[in-house]
Amino acid sequence: MTAAPILTRPAPGQFRTELIATLRLAGPLAAANILQMAVFATDVMFVSRLGQEPLAASSLAVAIFAVMLMAFYGLTGAVAALIAAELGRRRHAVREVRRSVRMALWLCVFLGIGGIAVCFNGEAMVRATGQTPVLAKLAGDFLRVCALSVIPMLVVNVLRTFVSAMGRPIFATVITAIAIGVNALGNWALVFGHLGMPPLGLLGSPLASFITACLTVLAYCLAIRSDRRLRRMHIFGRWWRPEWSRMRQIVALGLPIALTLMAEGGLFSSAAFLMGRIGEAQLAAHTVALQIASIFFQVPFGIGQAATIRVGYHFGARDREAVGRAGWAAFLVCMAFVGVSAAAMLLAPRLIVAAYIDINAPENAAMIVFAIQYLAVAAAFQLVDGAQAVIAGVLRGLQDTRVPMVIAVVSYWLAGFTTAYWLGFNTSLEGIGVWIGLAVGLTVAAILLLIRWVGRARFNLLPSATFG
């Protein structure tokens, strides 16, 4: 059987065809997400060689930068649902797609200016958390260089969203893979002073990220120009012309997504501070276990991105049955993967942890015990974490973002953080209690989002009629 094109509407009942289309879209997106984590890991690898203090300073700076960037990505990334719906309504929606992308790029500039202001006030923000003046100064300097990257990174996110929504997700995978090499070379040259460059130390890493982001923008532009389907959209045409109604539509759809991502990211960031109060070994183990869980999570996250596009396409075509097929196909693919990843965490935790730390070193004994315990909880919440990621993506395809935002805040903070704090500091569970709190937050979110998806007709989330 010939694989179905990514952006086509299967005939009624062809669930297998929808499943194939979802896999073809989700695979490259998940791979690109994992590769993007490798880009960030490259920075850590080079900065860690400078010593504990520079590494700690960069970690604090990246924590601020990452949460901000995550929110901005959610806001500008809302354009995926709009592009998919426009293509569903009319296959050759050149003008509509161009307007959406143009306004998303304008939004990158507006948000970027605000992001630059945040970066230039980074030292004061770090000081407010009670860090030492020296550490705050290093982190503030790091963030000021990071300010250069805000706008190009946001532009990369929009262009990546565009090529993926247009059915060319492989470009995202290839370009992100190339970015790893560029970023590694830039860190090697600028941090330590190779290739005739001055040794900039800690500040060389964010400068390498800026160069990588700019070259990535150029790579996407070349990819778009080289592909006939992408080129005919002329997304840079009349770039000076505003479409304020489209801008308001992106913001209205994207702002709840941004707040949702901040709520989830904030829960996991706050868990690190709770762990730090419990003990250093627990914090170190938490960092390792969370990094492992985050890598596994990139696949469900990619499936959720694919679900937004597939469901959004059928939503635009007003095909209620196809919307259901696309949503359940993404859910099935996700559950199959997280079942495997959960089994791996339960059956081979030491092997997985060994990829990060030396399990034979006596000084790491306590940390390894804690990390394996946390992975057992992570294995349990793989199912609900994957479910909430995919269902959230499905609902975004239906352009339903406000209620999911409320669900996220209630689930992650009222249920999750409260449970994590109480179990961590009022019972003997300590670190395990914090991780159980994370699992509770994700479970509540998954259940409430699933209820909303199953009741999509009752909640008036579906298009009014089928046509075409």
Image: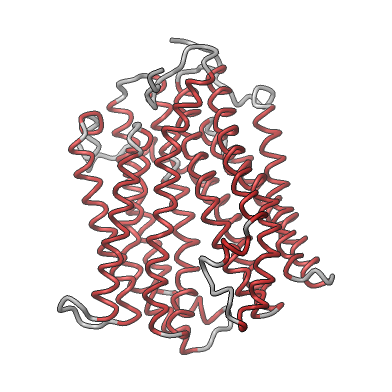
- Residue 280 image point, x, y percent: 64, 80
Residue lying at the far front in this picture: please name it.
360
Task: Compare residues 195 and 81 and report the one nearer the observer.
Answer: 195
Task: Compare residues 249 and 358 and report the one nearer the observer.
Answer: 358
Residue 295 position (above or below residue 97): below
- Quarter of the rendering containing residue 3: top left
Q: What residue sits 52% from the left and 39% below the top? A: 304
- Residue 159 image point, x, y percent: 31, 44
Residue 346 position (above or below residue 328): below
Q: Quadrant of the N terminus?
A: top left
- Quarter of the rendering containing residue 178: bottom left
- Please state if 337 lies on the left or on the right of 99 as rendered: right
Figure disc tally: 0
Q: What residue sits 42% from the left and 37% below the top? A: 80
Q: Quadrant of the C terminus?
A: top left
Q: What residue sits 49% from the left and 23% below the top? A: 18
Q: What residue sits 64% from the left and 75% below the top? A: 367
- Residue 10 image point, x, y percent: 46, 16
Residue 147 position (above or below residue 466): below
Q: How is the image coloured?
A: secondary structure
Residue lying at the far right in this picture: please name it.
427
- Residue 424 image point, x, y percent: 77, 69
